[in-house]
Image: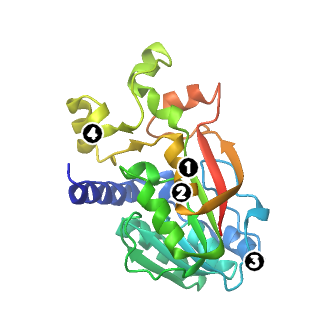
Amino acid sequence: MEREELLETNREAWNGLVSKGNRWTVPVGSASIDKARGGTPEFVLTPQKLVPQEWFPKLPGCKTLLLAGGGGQQAPLMAAAGAEVTVVDLSESQLEQDQVVARLEGLSIRSIQSSMDDLSDLEDASFDLVIHPCSNSFVPDINPVWREAARLTRSGGVLMAGFCNPLLFLFDDELAEKEGLKVSFALPYSDQHSLPAERCEALLKAGEPLMFGHTLEDQISGQLRAGFAISHMFEDSWGKESGEFEFALQELDRYTKSFIATRAMLF
């Protein structure tokens, strides 16, 4: 599947997930907005742990990019806290979730429909803060994502990102439910190339986005190569919510954490 076909497949899949009420597509409520107006936006980059408040720069007037960050969750909270927010997402339905909250709460959010790895319409060094919720498992190569983030970030600016622990993609969720965790795949992982053709086709028919498992080197060193210096990180677990890889995720969480978040600065 060529890049444009992949983008269209995942765009349609995420539009469908909005209609199904996927956990990453449900907008925040007024109580969360009110708390953010007081200067304390509370949201996640990974499934459960809130982003530490000390990770945020001063938010009033902070030019903020939500990278692949539609869904009505992080962006409205940042706007309520006084940031100048731009959201980029492949899915128009995800972008609309942000605008739903913006209209209800009197917020201003700029929406751009685009892939996270090609932001050529945005100017260099135009953001103080880039927030990248856990989503780069939906592109085959994450290095262009880090390079674009670095290009768009001002010197001294901050990148906050969440991503999957690559260990997750070693295991076959279908097999894990029957036989427990057994290494089945190599990294880097791709639904297209790692799964049997009939399994990949079943995902497409079910309206699921195609996923990619990136190496830890690309997740961490990719940020460093782009020019960022990582200052903080934490690990997180999946929890009990349903979703793809549910069984393998919950099993893996018994031994280690399934997700990682990093805070980095551009110098």
| Whether residue 68 can be seen here | no
> How far apart are labels 4 and 2 at the CA level?
27 Å
User: In the figure, 217 relative to 68: above or below?
Assistant: above
Element type at mark 2: helix
Give the number of the disc on residue 221. Answer: 1
Residue 225's label in the rendered image is 2
The residue nearer to you, when weighing 125 against 115, is 125
Camera-near label (4 vs 2) is 2
List x then y, in percent, for residue 94.
42, 66
Task: Specify how the rendered protein is coloured.
Answer: rainbow
Q: Which mark is first along the chain, 4 or 1?
A: 4
Mark 1 and mark 3 lie on one chain; the one further toward the N terminus is 3
Quarter occupied by residue 236: top right
Q: Judging from the image, what secondary structure is the residue with disc 4 in? A: helix
Examine the rendered structure and indicate whether residue 211 appears above or below residue 108.
above
Horizontal side of residue 44 vs 221, given as left or right: right
The amino acid beneath tag 4 is Gln
Disc 3 marks which residue?
58
Q: Which residue is drawn at 37% across and 44% down?
A: 211
Q: Earlier in the sequence, mark 4 or mark 2?
A: 4
Asked if the residues shown at circle 4 and circle 3 are in contact, with their CB atoms under 8 angstroms apart, the answer is: no
Foreground of the two, 162 or 204: 162
